[in-house]
Amino acid sequence: MRSSTTGLQLGRIGAWFNPRYRDDDRTEFVVQAEAFGYPTAWLGFGRASISDLALVERVLDATAAITVATAIVNMWTNDAADIARAYQRIASRHGDRFLLGIGIGHPESVTTYGQPYATMVDYLDHLDAGGVPVDRRILAALGPRALRLAGDRTLGTHPYLVVPDHTREARQILGPNPVIAPEHKVVLETDPHVARGIGRPFVADPYLKLRNYTNNLRRHGYNNDDDVAGGGSDRLIDALVLHGTTDEIGAGLHAHLDAGADHVAIQVLTADGHSPLPAYQQLAAALL
């Protein structure tokens, strides 16, 4: 695992925090995640313009040891030179705890989307010019071509909304060294109907409306129209949003590790208005 030789400490299980939460809340979430024992926190950003990376710096300043990763900096909405300068500012004080996650996003989410592979290559070239080390950046990648680029030009890949079969394919493509660190959603709830009631709306809108995700899911066993239509089939939702006891959820997360992942980032989903921290604490006690 490359992270063991670069100074970054990702660990096997991390905590992933959605941008729907306010910056103040996410700062506190990461402080608490560190106290629970998580070695890495991932900050989701979607397509937001965050070229100063101010939240990342704030979170790193508020913590002592946890690695903080962006998940992800969108290439269409954030200038690479600006991101490189922000990286240098933050890395000068927190270099061993900061991982720059970058990605191309989705054609449905930005009006300027075009030539995604060439854009990724150009963005990485600009990060090179700005002095961002290869082993301090990670690329969100789904398809084989993007995965190979991630392995060649970054620490590895941080794929979102994937199942263990994708992890297995990614390891076959990348070989033994690049880091594979998928995100996976969980609901700490033993009633499957309640769990699906929380997970399905989150997955269906917007993710099942984004063809990069649906095409990838079709490639990995969810190729019936009913799987990705509407709100998604029960078997798809159960695969993408693990639920049950902490042991049952742990088994689902370890399926990624068994398939070749180095690290899995847990995104806890809850009913509206409820804090995810109790579930993160219970999962930490069971998994870390």
Image: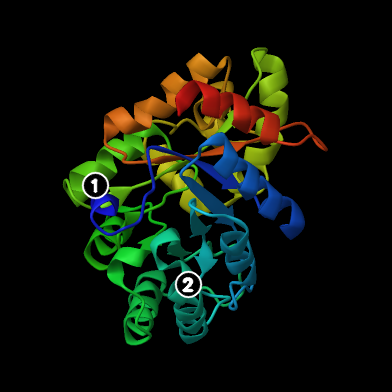
Q: Residue at x 38, y 61 (%)?
A: 139
Under circle 2, the secondary element is helix
Q: CA distance from mark 1 to mark 2?
A: 24 Å
Q: What kind of residue is marked 1?
A: Met
Asked whether disc 1 touches disc 2, contact meaning CB atoms under 8 Å apart, the reply is no
Q: Is residue 288 left or right of residue 270?
A: left
Q: Position of residue 90 (x, y in %)?
A: 50, 74
* Quarter occupied by the C terminus: top left
Dot label at residue 1: 1
Q: What kind of residue is marked 2?
A: Arg
Q: Residue at x 27, y 59 (%)?
A: 6
Dot label at residue 93: 2
Residue 195 placement: quadrant: top right
Q: Nearer the viewer, residue 257 or 148?
A: 257
Q: Is residue 138 left or right of residue 86?
A: left
One can see residue 124 in this view = yes
Q: Position of residue 115 (x, y in %)?
A: 41, 74
Q: Is residue 235 above or below residue 69?
A: above
One can see residue 22 in this view = no
Under circle 1, the secondary element is loop
Q: Nearer the viewer, residue 195 or 88?
A: 88
Q: How many marks?
A: 2
Q: Is residue 279 left or right of residue 158?
A: right
Q: Nearer the viewer, residue 263 or 144?
A: 263
Residue 111 placement: quadrant: bottom right
Q: Position of residue 1 (x, y in %)?
A: 24, 47
Q: Nearer the viewer, residue 39 or 269?
A: 39
| Colouring mode (rainbow / by chain / secondary structure / one colour) | rainbow
